[in-house]
Image: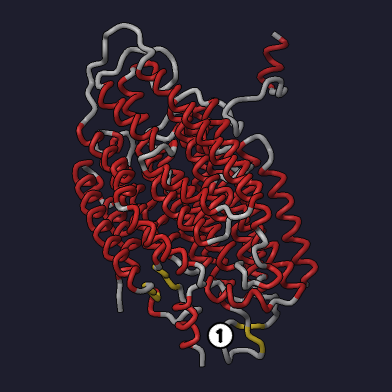
Amino acid sequence: MQHWAVLPILIPLLSATLMLLPPLARTIRRQRITSMISLVLMLGSALVLFHLSTEATQLYQLGDWQPPFGILLVADRVSALLVLLTTVLATGAVLYSLAGDDNQGKYFHSLMMFQLMGVNGAFLTGDIFNLFVFFEVLLIASYALLIHGGGKQKTQANVHYIVLNLIGSAFFLFALGMLYGTLGTLNMAQMSTRIADLSPGASILAEAGALLLLVVFGLKAAMMPLHFWLPKAYASASAPVAAMFAIMTKVGIYSIFRVHTVVFGEHAGDLAYIAIPWIWPLALLTLVIGAVGVLAAPSLRTLVANLILISAGTLLVAVVLLNTQAVIGGLYYLVHTTLVTGALFLLADLIAQQRGQATDRFVVSRPMKQAPLLGLLFFIGAVTVAGLPPLSGFVGKALLLQAAETATQMGWVWSSILLSSLAVIIALSRAGTNLFWHVSGNKTGTENARPIQIIAIVLLLLASPALVIFGGPATEFAEAAALQMQQMYPEVQTLIAEGQP
Amino acid sequence: MEAIFAFCVGLLTACGLFLTLRGRTFPVVVGITLLSYAVNLFLFSSGRLLINGATILGQSEQYADPLPQALVLTAIVIGFAMTAFVVILAIRARSDLGNDHVDGRNPPGAGLPSDRLKEKN
């Protein structure tokens, strides 16, 4: 039996637990070494899993229990890709934190590993209650990470974040109760086959459950009008944490995709695509709100937090277009946007450090010590995230625009995506001008950025040219992944059928 | 039995939701606790309500679905940990921010005892 699928969950779990024990917990140096070793192991296992998943979907029965009675991990192409993406992003964030951010509070590396475990688990699991458990794992790690470093702003943002997410978790359980009560199973593959045969009474309950799930996932994905917690939380978190959080909204969008277009997909009879009419306007409104937020942002970190809203809106559009082309564009855009916004959060922190008291607010300040280097990185990041050619943002958005088929779709999708891109270009050029050119005096600070911080940012930004250079293989992979996803887990269905007497 | 059960779950949920919408952290925490009680009962009922039903085959005439009980157990453990965390955070916010409002600052004209004292002086 292949054990690769469970490694992205086991490695961070073990290393996080080890780092809580006294021999490692006492010195930050040992924690850093353990953290790096486990990241290297995770990168290795994620790459192997990625490679294996292109040949066949990797199924892993936890405890060797026959599904649907046991929990099943399903590593198909999309899951393996997202696990790899998470690990790369975490590597960048942890590398950056080695410069000193990890020492501002206790147990940073342990919490980061628990967070990774939760995110990887949420991407890999094929059981909807297990999805809830991994959501809670990643959430409780993120609560503690958000206040890492301390300070009034973080505490204040965290109170909102936690209360909202606890209510979200309660709704999640209500929804699961309704779905289990009507469908009698929690295995997502089996759920998708049973939905069509529901009696009318049960079907209403299942519909309520599915729409409650949309609320919960929308809260995680920062879908309008459940996005109000995001800008403040992300802008006040410390830089590596904010960079790591760039993947969190994507967990919500991934779950919406899995549940509302695969489980409640076209075969679901009366319940086919019930959530789509709701997501349509909300996706476009998220884009608009993100664009307004970007234009109104008073500081670079708030601006980048609003960029996350725009990317969430764009990805939601990719979900609701309901065709293969849109999923291809969506996957490509997801990889690009996660890594680039992560890099921008790290860069914003470096800029804030070198500008002294002005931090990252758009006001006149002393010049930066390494203005040319930071300016170049900011320029590359800005071009990528705004979607200008020749970098990956352009390719991702072009793929998505192509996916709109009918004239109405084109009208809505094109105008909102292109207008939000325009807002991003305006906001980022204003930000760059303010940060790098509106300076007073020639006296700079004395501190240089540490090489490891620059390496971390370059590592994340390099993904963008790489996605363009290997654009052919990347879109081919995305196409295979999109087609595989629409088939509702054929391998799992055979496995379940084999187990039945 | 079903009617009483459904009424209790509904009442708990309504109270929980009302309290989580309050402005101070203490009622919000109590509201979240009530909401999690409601959720646990609700999950339990998703396996249908039965009297004299064991979860092990061959022990009684009818048998109950064991899965919701396992789910409730998981939900209780997670809910307990989350509540503990939110209580600690509420105390921390009270000391960091100097008040117990969820927004971190008292709204103007909230009619607090401290405000009335100021008016008197």
Q: Quadrant of the N terminus of chain A?
A: bottom left
Residues A407 and A392: in front is A407
- Residue A288: x and y in percent read 60, 37
Residue at image location 53% in from the left, 66% down from the top: A128
- Residue B57: x and y in percent read 57, 89
Task: Say how many tags the image has.
Answer: 1
Residue that lies at the very extreme toward the top in this rendered image: A441
Q: Is residue A308 left or right of residue B8?
A: left
Q: What residue type is disc 1 on?
A: Ile
Q: Is residue A345 visible?
A: no
- Residue A334: x and y in percent read 43, 50
Q: Is residue A370 above or below residue A338?
A: above
Residue at image location 33% in from the left, 25% down from the top: A351
Q: Residues within 10 Å of mark 1 (few under 14, many from 20)?
A: few
Residues A417 and A410: in front is A410
Q: How is the image coloured?
A: secondary structure
Residues A395 and A376: in front is A395
Snapshot quadrant of residue A62: bottom left
Q: Is residue A11 left or right of residue A230?
A: left
Q: Give the chain of mark 1.
A: B
Q: Is residue A123 above or below residue A398?
A: below
Q: Which residue is mark 1?
A: B56
- Residue A461: x and y in percent read 31, 40
Residue that lies at the very extreme toward the front in this rendered image: A407
Residue that lies at the very extreme toward the right in this rendered image: B3
Residue at image location 47% in from the left, 47% down from the top: A398
SS at circle 1 = loop
Q: Is residue A129 visible?
A: yes
Residue at image location 48% in from the left, 61% down from the top: A133
